[in-house]
Image (cartoon, helix red, strand yellow):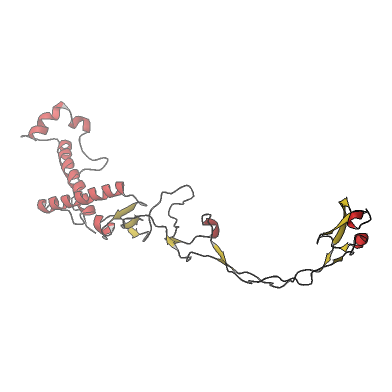
Amino acid sequence: MAKNYLTPFANARDANVTSEYEWASGEMASTLSKGFQSGVARSDRVNRALAQGTSAGYSIGQLVADYANQDAGIDAKALYDGFKKALERFSRISVVDVVYPVGSIYCSTSSISPSTLFGVGVWERIGAGRCLVDAGDGFVAGSQGGADTCRLTANEMPPHSHSATVDPSGEHAHTRGTMNITGEFGCDDRATWIARGAFSSQQHTENNTSADGGDGAPWYKIVFDASRSWTGETSRGGVHKHSAQIGSTGGGQSFSVRNPYVAVYMWKRVS
């Protein structure tokens, strides 16, 4: 460790040093501007003059030892060079401590660590491949989360439809099968009551006359109506089924959810 050899003089509490009030008084004005003249000077005033210089030298020497990492002595040139180095380092530390206190994040497109760049503090790389998000609203400071890609679940897909086609199958025809329509009726006008089954008789509006060889009784007509009486059913041939083809789409691959980005190096100051 560097050492400061510039020690203070007359700094004890009971040191023989004139007071601040007397040193700043009008009586001392001439001595302060011209120095001690001929005659005997008071020791407390001489000590005050020496104490001021040595105190200033000690302060500068301690800065050199603490921040320039070199010994401070009475070599004026070395002391000056060390003082410049000490001021540079002290200024850098002060600025870095203000701008980047412990816990701060430093970003750069250069890969040089801030500990090397600034010469101040201990830093660690963080967040490789990640972006920064403001803490709060469920985001705890220092926590990590998120993903580069995502695969949708069924509930996350938008409503949609699929087209479908039905293949033709089972081309067929129906036959009469066991269906049988039956009926009968009489062969002259007096036998019309015999009409049965799908046949029925209805009285005509005209009568048969003797001129026609008839007996003057009403004419009847025979009516056919298949819905009156029939039995059986058509064949059941052609039992079949159809196959339906529903179109599908999608490969189920993950997709990127990463925002547009600029890649940088990030460090966090830990001490």
The residue closer to the viewer here, 271 or 221, is 221
State left or right for residue 101 relative to residue 67.
Answer: right
Q: Indicate the position of residue 197 as horizontal and vertical percent values.
A: 87, 63
Q: From what the image shows, is residue 150 above or below residue 32?
A: below
State left or right for residue 229 relative to residue 150.
Answer: right
Name the residue located 93 percent from the left edge and 60 percent from the top edge.
Answer: 190
Q: Quadrant of the C terminus?
A: bottom left
The residue closer to the viewer here, 163 or 75, is 163
The residue closer to the viewer here, 153 or 2, is 153
Name the residue located 10 percent from the left edge and 52 percent from the top edge.
Answer: 77
Name the residue located 72 percent from the left edge and 71 percent from the top edge.
Answer: 175
Q: Quadrant of the N terminus?
A: bottom left
Q: How many marks?
A: 0
Can you name the residue that lies furthest to the left here? Answer: 38
The residue closer to the viewer here, 180 or 170, is 180
Q: From what the image shows, is residue 183 above or below residue 82?
A: below
Q: Indicate the position of residue 37 as horizontal and vertical percent values.
A: 6, 34
Can you name the residue that lies furthest to the front here? Answer: 211
State left or right for residue 161 relative to residue 211.
Answer: left
Name the residue located 21 percent from the left edge and 46 percent from the top edge.
Answer: 59
Residue 171, by quadrant, is bottom right
State left or right for residue 127 relative to residue 111.
Answer: right
Q: Indicate the position of residue 11 as horizontal and vertical percent values.
A: 23, 43
Q: From what the image shows, is residue 15 above or below residue 129?
A: above
Residue 129, by quadrant, is bottom left
Residue 193, by quadrant, is bottom right
